[in-house]
Amino acid sequence: MRNLLVIAIVILFAACSAHKGKLLQKVGYIEAGDKKISLSPSPKNTLSISYFQCGGICIKSGNDVVLVDPFASNPSVVSKVKTDTAAVGLIMKGINPTDIKAILVSHSHYDHLMDAPYIMNTYCPQTTKLFVNHTGVQIAERLKVDSARIVDVEQPAGFSSVSGNIRVLPIVSSHPPHIGNTKLYDGEYRPNTKPAQKSFWRCGKPYAYLIDIMDGTEVSFRLMVQTSASNKASANLPDSLLKAKGVDVLVMPVALYSKTPGYPASVLNIIKPKYTIIGHWENFFRPYKKLTVKPYQVAGGTDVMAFAKTMEQLVGKDKFRIPMPGSSITIDY
């Protein structure tokens, strides 16, 4: 009965989608295709950030690649969940697998973790590390990811070097409720469930990530990624880190933002990024391939237009982007 209730609620959310994708494009909040920006009057370096969906991104710096929440499988509202290998192939196209140094996963809901074990086992070299919460560790191990390749981010260890030029810092975050005060599939791993069930993919403890591109011992570029609408990650980021080096690019979600009082202003006031990328805006119950060519449906239950207008007031229209799935941003810095 509970599963039927959850399905009914999710269907209602999907049906109530504002369908404002066309209008968002028309007024320039969502831009089709790739983009190039410069964060310095005299840039010396370049990196790229490709957007998958649901907050998932690919960061390329030279021959180093870090994936965050790589997901493309998009089951329908009522179907069982499983990795769509063809869709994953689309997001992996253009990525040299041997360059993948780490996969960072924010929490263990299926739309963030589900495709990562398949990518680890199919695409990545044995040196690639999967960073995930304790629930995600158990899920990944059940899906045959070698435990030696998994980093439990709930075991505090400070910064971890994932290559000679990149280090990452997990930051405790939180997840907003989905309906009222209810969080769907909240809590920890339940071994008696099956991977095809959405209830298998319990959230666990959510995390954000600080990702530093290093130039020797100095941080040359700093990226912060959070995939849940939360004020907690920014509050947990040590002031000393921000004083030593500010955040160049912040990746943050729009989904469920109205469930987090003060968001996004509360986060932006602390982080003060030079540029912001907005994710988790699209209706991920549509097949990924359709989102890349005609993403006209926004996430159900989320007023993306109101969020975009708030962002324009807070940072200016030229200081943030709502990217199409499959598009990329090249950043000179």
Image (spheres, rainbow, N blue to C red):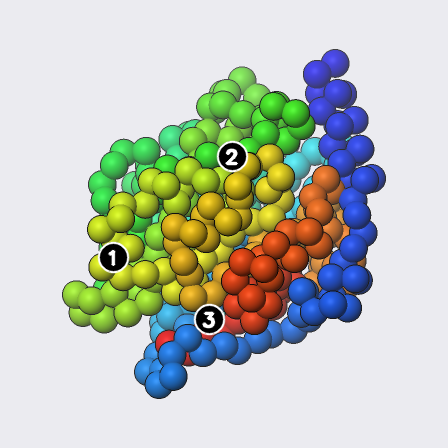
Residue found at x 25% / y 36%: 156
* SS for dot 2: loop
Residue found at x 45% / y 78%: 38
* SS for dot 1: helix
- Work out which residue is located at the far left of the displayed protein and give it: 217
Q: Residues within 10 Å of mark 3 (few under 14, many from 20)?
A: some
- Badge nearest the viewer, 3 or 1: 1
- Badge nearest the viewer, 2 or 1: 1
- Work out which residue is located at the far top of the displayed protein and give it: 1
Q: In which quarter of the image is the C terminus?
A: bottom left
The amino acid at mark 1 is Lys
- Badge nearest the viewer, 3 or 2: 2
Residue 278 makes an appearance in the image? yes
Q: Name the residue under label 2.
A: 175
Residue 84 makes an appearance in the image? no
Q: In this view, does 70 lie above or below 333?
A: above
The amino acid at mark 2 is His
Q: Position of residue 228 (x, y in %)?
A: 52, 42
Q: Position of residue 120 (x, y in %)?
A: 45, 50
Q: Name the residue under label 1.
A: 243
- Work out which residue is located at the far front of the displayed protein and give it: 313
